[in-house]
Image (cartoon, coloured by chain):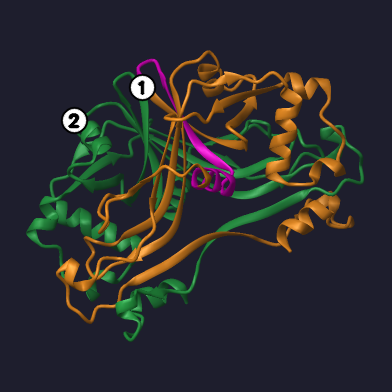
Chain colours: A green, B orange
Amino acid sequence: MTELNRFPEQGVTDRAALDALLDSQLAGVLACIADGEPLAVPMLYARDGDRVLLHGSTGAGALRRVASGAPAVLTVFTLDALVVAPTTFESSVNYRSATIRGPLEPVEDQEAALDLFSDVLLPGRRAEVRPPNRKELAATLALSLPIREGSWLLKVADDWPATPAEADAEPDVWSGLVPLRTVLGAPLPAPWSADLPVPPSVRRLTD
Amino acid sequence: MTELNRFPEQGVTDRAALDALLDSQLAGVLACIADGEPLAVPMLYARDGDRVLLHGSTGAGALRRVASGAPAVLTVFTLDALVVAPTTFESSVNYRSATIRGPLEPVEDQEAALDLFSDVLLPGRRAEVRPPNRKELAATLALSLPIREGSWLLKVADDWPATPAEADAEPDVWSGLVPLRTVLGAPLPAPWSADLPVPPSVRRLTD
């Protein structure tokens, strides 16, 4: 990420690796240009085959800007480990980072898009609640970012630190990795739900 | 984040809350404009009082572009919980998101900047390894993004989901939060470090 690694960050052309990264995260940063300045907004997304869906309120500024086909790029990344090298200079992080370039496209079926978002955020939840109503659908703007050959770039740093010899360091300095991962905590019922059983969708998530 | 929350995301003007978010994360997305297109690159950062330091190789494209004072914005965010609402429409995430606008400024003391990065990535590590040498310092470009009044924006969504009445949902649908957090795993020694004791800096991190 800082391009200070022993091996420069690797560009990866494996589409399955891109999908694995996208499917492992929930949010990215959508960047566009607004009045000559870069505008960058974190957004939830959901991959749907060869496209990434973004959604928000129809009043959301950043989405409205890119809805008309303005240049845009979505960045998704995750840190996988601290890389503890035998020198501070060589110390860094292992990470995976993807950028997907727009333009974004309209989504015909807003209800299907909302359903997909629900399925990504919490699989199985749709069976437990009522479907979206007309008012909710009208208030939602879903856009699609196609994943096309040449429209995406994946970088992966996944390596041991530099050796002491490579880093010109003392031979007896410990080095290694400290893995990082995101975990889900125990569900917290809303005050008005305290007496209700935790539903299957939430139980499956945290079991 | 999707602006679908019961209460629209809250703009927060508390500088301590900004610092808490910045200090809880290691990386953000730096966005600038390159040849009329938005360019967005994940980067490690380190807060140093009223500035955020960024660093990378002197050959790194994105850093070079913003080194000369081009418009740039750093976005840092974290997801704090899944918000499981009584409808899919109201379901979302609790999150904190900061943007800090540039331009970036040169850093006089590159060695102090590198030291700070090390202290943020792994406190105490500097005492265990040799200091950076001249060649390493020459290969590093550190830049500073000042945190000034009006240059940053913090948004926080930290709330229970909509109530069933607010969401026009069945009253007996469970809703609540599922907290998300990042944890450190057990240190993995590099193959050539397997017989060395895990150093205090790494032990403190994961104890």
The image quarter in which residue A50 lies: top left
How far across and how far down the image is residue B65, in percent?
A: 51, 17
Q: Which chain carries label 1?
A: A
Q: In this view, does B69 lie to the left or right of B155?
A: right
The image quarter in which residue A167 lies: top right
Q: Give the range drawn in magenta.
A: B17-36
Check disc 2 and report the residue beneath it.
Answer: A68
Against B148, is B206 above or below?
A: below
Residue at figure coordinates x 29%, y 39% from the top left: A146
Residue at figure coordinates x 65%, y 20% from the top left: B107
How far across and how far down the image is residue B169, in percent?
A: 17, 72
How far across and how far down the image is residue A54, in percent?
A: 28, 46
Q: Is residue B33 left or right of residue A66?
A: right
Q: In this view, does B128 lie to the left or right of B106?
A: right
- Residue B19 on the magenta span: yes
Q: Which of marks 1 and 2 is in front?
A: 1
Q: Which chain carries label 2?
A: A
Residue at figure coordinates x 17%, y 77% from the top left: B170
Q: Residue A37 carries which label?
A: 1
- Marks 1, 2 in one chain: yes
Callout 2: few (<14), some (14-19), or many (20+) C-alpha neighbours within 10 Å?
A: few
How far across and how far down the image is residue A10, in percent?
A: 58, 35
Q: Quadrant of the N terminus of chain A?
A: top right
Of A113 and B150, nearer the camera is B150
Residue type at mark 2 is Ser
Residue type at mark 1 is Glu
Q: Which mark is residue B147?
A: none
Secondary structure of the residue carrying numbered label 1: strand
Pointer 1 or 2: first along the chain = 1
